[in-house]
Image (cartoon, rainbow, N blue to C red):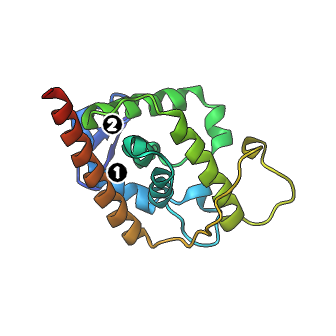
């Protein structure tokens, strides 16, 4: 068996993901319940909330990509970075799922550089606000300045609603822009 059962009741094949098996409601539901940092935070802080915060940091034309940059985690979970980096098969599976998501939502699979930068700024902010104190710097955060604002995590239910509402708004805006651009 290589599939999982999603919240909406669909079978999603992890090794042969299909665009027509992607559901925005499944992504919002799962990401709102997935806790960042493998749960090693004082209070639940979801991948959905992280994604919302990343999307606020990029120019308007890249917000959809930023909101969805961790969407694969709705299907494979939020694996910690050090483990993900030593598992090439996992990375291949994650990329295959990313392509299915992008195909379903008509999104360019190449993330803009500003999304990666915003993700790192949020990581620095999350480390400061959510993680236990640890002397020293994380190497990946060298030169990255956290935001001034402090994070107060939202509930999983609120994160699910906010993520899905933002996703629907961005999809509608992107679709309208593409239709308008194609009419010229």
Taking the spot 51% from the left edge, 57% from the top edge, the residue there is 50
Marks 2 and 1, the one that precedes in the sequence: 1
Give the vertical position of 86 relative to 34 (above or below): above
Side of 103 relative to 136 (left or right) = left
CA gap between label 2 and label 1 equals 10 Å
The quadrant holding residue 88 is top right
As drawn, the label of residue 101 is: 2
Q: Residue furthest front?
A: 184
Mark 2 lies on a secondary structure that is helix
Side of 93 relative to 11 (left or right): right
Figure label count: 2
Whole-percent x, y for residue 15 in the image: 38, 29
Q: Residues within 10 Å of mark 1 (few under 14, many from 20)?
A: many
Q: Nearer the viewer, residue 85 or 130?
A: 130
Task: Tell me where residue 72 sits by quadrant.
Answer: top left
- Any mark on residue 27, and which? 1
Report the quarter where the C terminus lies.
Answer: top left
Residue placed most toward the observer, 52 or 102: 52
The answer to whether the residue labelled 2 contacts the one labelled 1, judged by CB atoms less than 8 Å apart, is: yes
Query: In this rendering, is residue 151 above or below 65?
Result: below
């Amino acid at each position: 068996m290589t599939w999982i059962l999603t919240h909406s009741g669909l079978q999603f094949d992890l090794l042969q993901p299909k665009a027509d098996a992607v559901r925005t409601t499944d992504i919002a539901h799962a990401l709102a319940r997935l806790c960042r940092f493998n749960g090693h935070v004082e209070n639940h802080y979801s991948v959905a909330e992280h994604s919302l915060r990343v999307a606020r940091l990029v120019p308007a034309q890249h917000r959809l990509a930023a909101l969805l940059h961790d969407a694969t985690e709705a299907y494979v979970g939020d694996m910690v970075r050090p483990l993900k980096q030593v598992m090439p098969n996992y990375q291949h599976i994650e990329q295959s799922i990313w392509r299915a998501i992008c195909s379903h939502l008509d999104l360019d699979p190449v993330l803009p550089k500003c999304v990666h930068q915003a993700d790192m700024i949020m990581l620095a902010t999350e480390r400061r606000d959510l993680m236990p104190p640890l002397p020293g710097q994380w190497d990946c955060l060298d030169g990255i300045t956290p935001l001034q604002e402090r994070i107060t995590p939202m509930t999983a239910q609120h994160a699910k609603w906010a993520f899905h509402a933002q996703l629907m708004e961005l999809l509608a805006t992107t679709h309208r822009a593409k239709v308008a651009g194609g009419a010229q």
